[in-house]
Amino acid sequence: MCHAGHRPGRKTLSILAVAEEHVRRAILLNYYLGCRAGPVETFSLRWTAVRWESETILVISANKAGSNPGRLRSIQSCCRLLKAWWKADARATGISSTGALNA
């Protein structure tokens, strides 16, 4: 997981430069939030899980122990980026509070 002020390295930036938007979002979500790539953590993130006031997001992990309420993770390092995506998604869909973060 990255800390506020950190940016992806040169190799990651070169991949991001040619990746499609949904792939770019998935890479950046994994980088900034420390999510595991895949259907449970990265691809199940929804805008409704973002808590803008506390700058956190609820990340659900794989349910390996029987019950999984999820964990709150800080979005402080990527809050500005998430807000830009949220606004872009709202303009594109007309919906501002639902849907996938990596759509």
Image (spheres, rainbow, N blue to C red):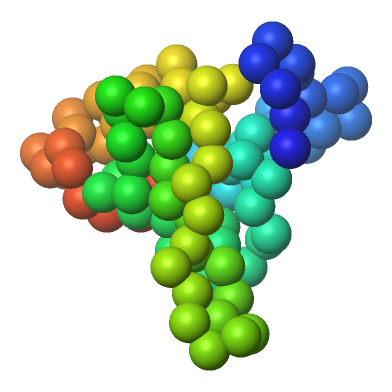
Residue 2 horizontal/vertical position (percent)? 73, 29
**Above or below, 5 relative to 60:** above
Looking at the picture, how far across and down is residue 4, in whole percent?
Answer: 66, 16
Q: Nearer the viewer, residue 18 or 68?
A: 68
Image-quadrant location for residue 36: bottom right
- In the orientation shown, which residue stands out farthest toward the top? 5
Q: Please state which of residues 25 and 30 is positioned toward the viewer in this rendering.
A: 30
> Horizontal placement of 64 versus 80: left or right?
right
**Residue occupying the point 74% across, 37% down:** 1
**Based on the displayed image, in which of its 4 quarters is residue 41 positioned?**
bottom right
The part of the image, by quadrant, that contains residue 8 is: top right
Given residues 89 and 1, the one toward you in this image is 1
| Vertical arrangement, residue 26 with respect to residue 13, above or below | below
In this picture, residue 86 sits left or right of residue 42: left
User: What residue is at 69 percent from the left and 45 percent from the top?
Assistant: 34
Q: Is residue 101 left or right of residue 13?
A: left
Q: Is residue 18 visible?
A: no
How many numbered marks, from 0 up?
0
Looking at this rendering, what residue extends furthest in the left direction? 94
Residue 43's place in the image compared with 95, above or below, is below
Residue 98, x across and y down, in percent? 21, 50
Whether residue 92 is visible: yes
Q: Residue at x 57, y 67 (%)?
A: 61
